């Protein structure tokens, strides 16, 4: 059975499941250097994407579209899009199930649009359900046939806890945790420099907003957490009206108007750092209360889904609590994984499969394209590339195979560089036109990670916080964040990834099992789709792809 999941709104994408295997997931932002968070250009683009991956749209058995809010002016949940170049409103499932719903996996059916002539109409599931099932079905718990709790906290909803039973296949709501929607951190931070958007054009504000949370998480390292201010945030949140995505703006307005009385002497970074820590502790406290009351004495698995699961500080607070047997976060917990998640809902509900077989390198395949004049190319294997990194100390754009799923470069669309150079973080941030407070992630061999990082446990997808062990910050200074932490990615040569093989050889040559790893992309766009894009960008001396080294004549 071929199932195609479609995310039509921002973070648009198309995912194909064959049986229970994810064949590919193509996010629109990773095509043609599109801007981050791009939506589908047109519903006809679904067939175009399938065709680009060698799939005839007529062979698809079922199309499934992600749920959403009612678009402005619409009476029903829908996505404002185009069809054949003409404006079209696509009806879909609601964004969220009722918290008392007995079936969060309710299947909605629509006939407003046919993606092909044989699979008439399409199904749709709640947007929240795609986060829940996208996380569970990709988890090791599903692979082992184990039950799990699933915590979903996304931009438009308060955090909600579900329980998935592997034996009965039931997905049941457990409880909401508190009345604060997931957009609150980004929207609150947008009231403070450097994230204020007063000078951002109205049509660009949504894209600006979508990028704030990750930047603010990094910026918080410039501040100091003032736990004495937690009580003030308690009072402010309790005074807000009913659950609403507009509460964040109201909170921001109050704090900016009364900051000298509410948070005397605190800088913007202090306020952001304190609010981030406050939300993480609030999340853990409410989660602990519910779990201990409802599942007393049990040690359960937990999956995390929704955009808030990209916050490594909050993920680490939960994992480090010891409350759960194990904690799983997929590399695409935000809407970048929505096409996968909505297809997983159909897989889970309509077939006998519990787990999805998947590989993080399932995005679009890299191509070469037409190079700018003057660029030279020669054969270069992974060992030679490792030697070049060691001897020249130059950052290298690495483009290999299929792109990573989700927002983080994990070796196939990365810029790799030596971490031993104290100036490399500054250089990479300048090359990428990023603020100097932004961190550069370490790529580290799995079996060496615990020697360098604390805890240094396997962290394949950069989703938890790690501290530097004594002595290593001086040896690999380029990957140390301002708060002496690192957003670690562990990898080993059992993974079919060229970057893993480069790192293995680099360790053999240098004795350092760590390289800098940052995403290879134009500022504000998705990953480079081809070598030609990286060459036209031209900010590095070298681009490496599929055993070939391309050299920039301007360096």
Image (tube, helix red, strand yellow):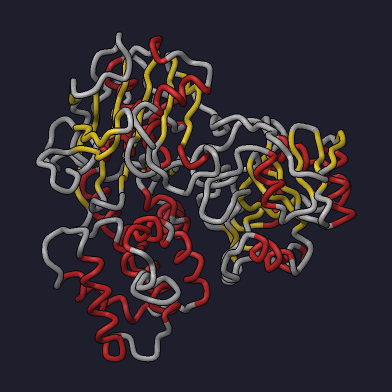
Could you tell me which residue is drawn at 44 percent across and 43 percent down?
329
Question: Where's residue 35, x and y in %?
Answer: 48, 48
- 494 displayed left or right of 318: right
Could you tell me which residue is drawn at 27 percent across and 23 percent down?
169
Does residue 433 show up?
A: yes
The N terminus, quarter of image: top left
Asked where in the image residue 467 lies, by quadrant, the reply is bottom right
Q: Nearer the viewer, residue 545 or 257?
A: 545
Question: Where's residue 103, x and y in %?
Answer: 17, 30
Question: Where's residue 11, x and y in %?
Answer: 40, 43
Question: Where's residue 486, x and y in %?
Answer: 60, 60
Asked where in the image residue 207 lies, by quadrant, the reply is bottom left
Could you tell me which residue is drawn at 75 percent across and 49 percent down?
396
Could you tell me which residue is drawn at 30 percent across and 50 percent down?
153
- 318 displayed left or right of 539: left
- 415 displayed left or right of 44: right
Total residue callouts: 0
Instruction: Please determine whether, in this image, residue 259 is positioned above or below residue 145.
Output: below
Asked where in the image residue 479 lies, by quadrant, the reply is bottom right
Does residue 284 show up?
A: no
The C terminus, quarter of image: bottom right
Q: Nearer the viewer, residue 198 or 237?
A: 198
């Amino acid at each position: 059975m071929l199932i195609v999941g479609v995310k039509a709104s921002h973070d648009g994408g198309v995912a194909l499941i064959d049986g229970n295997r994810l064949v590919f997931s193509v996010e629109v932002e990773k095509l043609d250097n599109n801007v981050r968070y791009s939506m589908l250009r047109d519903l006809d683009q679904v067939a175009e994407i399938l065709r680009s991956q060698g799939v005839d749209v007529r062979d698809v058995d079922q199309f499934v579209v992600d749920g959403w809010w009612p678009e402005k002016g619409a009476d029903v949940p829908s996505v404002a899009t185009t069809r054949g170049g003409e404006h079209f409103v696509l009806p879909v499932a609601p964004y969220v199930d009722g918290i008392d719903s007995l079936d969060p996996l309710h299947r909605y059916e629509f006939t407003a649009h046919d993606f092909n002539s044989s699979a008439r109409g399409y199904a749709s599931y709640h947007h929240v359900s795609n986060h829940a099932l996208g996380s569970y079905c990709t988890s090791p718990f599903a692979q082992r046939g184990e039950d799990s709790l699933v915590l979903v906290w996304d931009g438009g909803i308060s955090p909600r806890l579900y329980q998935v039973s592997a034996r009965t296949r039931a997905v049941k709501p457990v409880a909401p945790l508190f009345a604060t929607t997931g957009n609150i951190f980004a929207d609150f931070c947008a009231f403070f420099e450097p994230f204020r958007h007063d000078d951002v054009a109205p049509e660009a504000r949504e894209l600006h907003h979508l990028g704030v949370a990750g930047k603010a998480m990094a910026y918080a390292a410039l501040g100091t957490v003032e736990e004495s201010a937690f009580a003030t945030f308690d009072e402010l949140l309790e005074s807000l009206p009913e659950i609403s995505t507009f509460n964040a703006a109201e909170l921001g307005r109050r704090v900016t108007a009364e900051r000298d009385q509410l948070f005397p002497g605190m800088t913007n970074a202090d306020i952001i750092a304190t609010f981030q820590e406050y939300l993480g502790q609030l999340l853990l406290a409410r989660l602990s209360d519910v779990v201990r009351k409802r599942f007393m004495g049990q040690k359960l698995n937990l999956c995390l889904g929704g955009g808030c699961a990209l916050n490594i500080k909050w993920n680490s607070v939960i994992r480090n609590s010891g409350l759960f047997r194990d904690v799983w976060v997929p590399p695409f917990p935000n809407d970048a994984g929505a096409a996968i998640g909505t297809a997983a809902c159909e897989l889970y509900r309509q077939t006998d499969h519990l787990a999805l077989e998947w590989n993080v390198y399932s995005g679009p395949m890299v191509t070469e394209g037409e190079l700018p004049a003057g660029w030279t190319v020669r054969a270069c294997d992974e060992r030679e590339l490792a030697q070049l990194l060691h001897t020249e100390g130059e950052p290298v754009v690495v483009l290999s195979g299929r792109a990573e799923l989700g927002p983080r470069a994990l070796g196939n669309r990365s810029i790799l560089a030596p971490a031993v150079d104290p100036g490399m973080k500054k250089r990479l941030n300048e090359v990428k036109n990023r603020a100097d407070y932004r961190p550069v992630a370490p790529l580290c061999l799995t079996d060496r990670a615990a020697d360098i990082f604390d805890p240094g446990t396997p962290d394949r997808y950069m989703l938890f916080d790690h501290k530097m062990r004594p002595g290593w910050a001086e040896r690999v200074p380029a990957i140390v964040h301002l708060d002496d932490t690192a957003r670690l990615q562990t990898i080993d040569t059992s993974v079919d990834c060229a970057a893993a093989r480069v790192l293995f050889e680099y360790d053999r040559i240098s004795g350092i099992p760590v390289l800098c790893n940052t995403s290879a992309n134009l500022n504000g766009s998705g990953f480079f789709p081809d070598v030609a894009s990286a060459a036209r960008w031209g900010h590095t001396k070298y681009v490496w792809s599929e055993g070939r080294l391309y050299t920039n004549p301007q360096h």
